[in-house]
Image (tube, grey):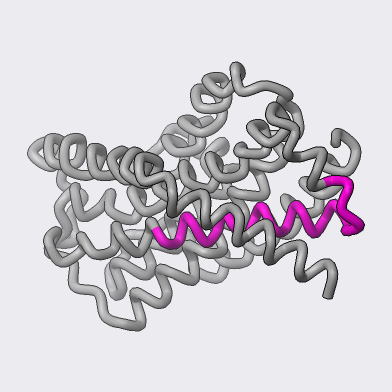
Amino acid sequence: MRELNAVYVIVAREIKKFTRERSRLISTLARPLIWLFLVGGGMSRLVSPGMGVSYIQFIYPGILGMTILFSSIFSSISIIWDKEFGLLKEILVAPVSRLSIVIGKALSGTIISVIQVVIILCLSPFLGLKMGLLSIIYVIAISSLLAFCISSLGIIVASFFESFESFGAIINFIVMPMFFLSGAMYPVKQLPDILKLLTKMNPVTYGVDALKHAVFRGRAMHDFSIVTDVGLLIIASVISIIVAGVLFERKN
């Protein structure tokens, strides 16, 4: 019960921070909206994915993946802030395992990401996408799994940084490549072999592909089977949370 209570306290704290920081919600939602309507709207005049789907509709699952990626990474990297202000030391002196702290951080990032995904889902009718209740539940489930995986990866990254000055490196060399090499903007099958290999090593790829299964039910817009997507996401999530727990134990 003590471990569960520790997880609950960390999750409650992060969600309370999120609800109080309205600028964070606005800035996080502004990025996918810009990509969806500006980039997607412009490219839709030049690119046609076929299958009766416009380009802006094609990248919609990728935009959901982008929302999860940025939100989960930012939520987990708040550990760096906690280090700088000494809050992490107060958390670590509590008589609970480090793994409970890691799971609490990962779950809080997951919940915050899914909240933002639900907001972006409200745009689907305006894009001409008809999604039933089952598809929406499916999207939320896949989003939760992907968000947990990315949040765990974010904790791994945060374990190697002591100050927030290096935050730009995280964005430029980790987050953006993960987004562009995820099949969010173009089909994986059409990439060059070297990029295709890198894409298949990216867990976001399988999350975005699973979201395509949910959004485009009955249309062959995906690159992998749903079993492959979900299976690899589960494996990546388990490995990530274990590695995050080990690194958090050693470096903190």
Look at the magenta stretch and give its main secondary structure: helix
Q: Work out whether 122 lies above or below 20.
A: below
Residue 106 falls left or right of residue 239: left
Instruction: Determine the residue positioned at 38% across, 59% down.
Output: 117
Residue 113 lies within the magenta run:
yes
Instruction: Determine the residue positioned at 61% across, 18% down.
Output: 166
Residue 218 falls left or right of residue 56: right
In the rendering, at what x and y percent does residue 176 appear? 46, 31
Residue 169 falls left or right of residue 137: right
In the rendering, at what x and y percent does residue 164 appear? 61, 23
Residue 186 at least partly seen: no
Instruction: Determine the residue positioned at 88% across, 57% down.
Output: 97
Q: Work out whether 218 lies above or below 113.
A: below
Residue 24 lies within the magenta run:
no
In the rendering, at what x and y percent does residue 142 appear? 49, 66
Instruction: Determine the residue positioned at 28% across, 49% down.
Output: 59
Residue lying farthest left?
A: 45
Residue 12 falls left or right of residue 17: right
Most foreground residue, 56 or 28: 28
> The magenta stretch spans which residues?
92-115
Most foreground residue, 81 or 214: 81
Residue 134 at least partly seen: yes
Which quadrant of the rendered structure holds the N terminus?
bottom right
In the rendering, at what x and y percent does residue 182 appear? 46, 43
Residue lying farthest top?
A: 165
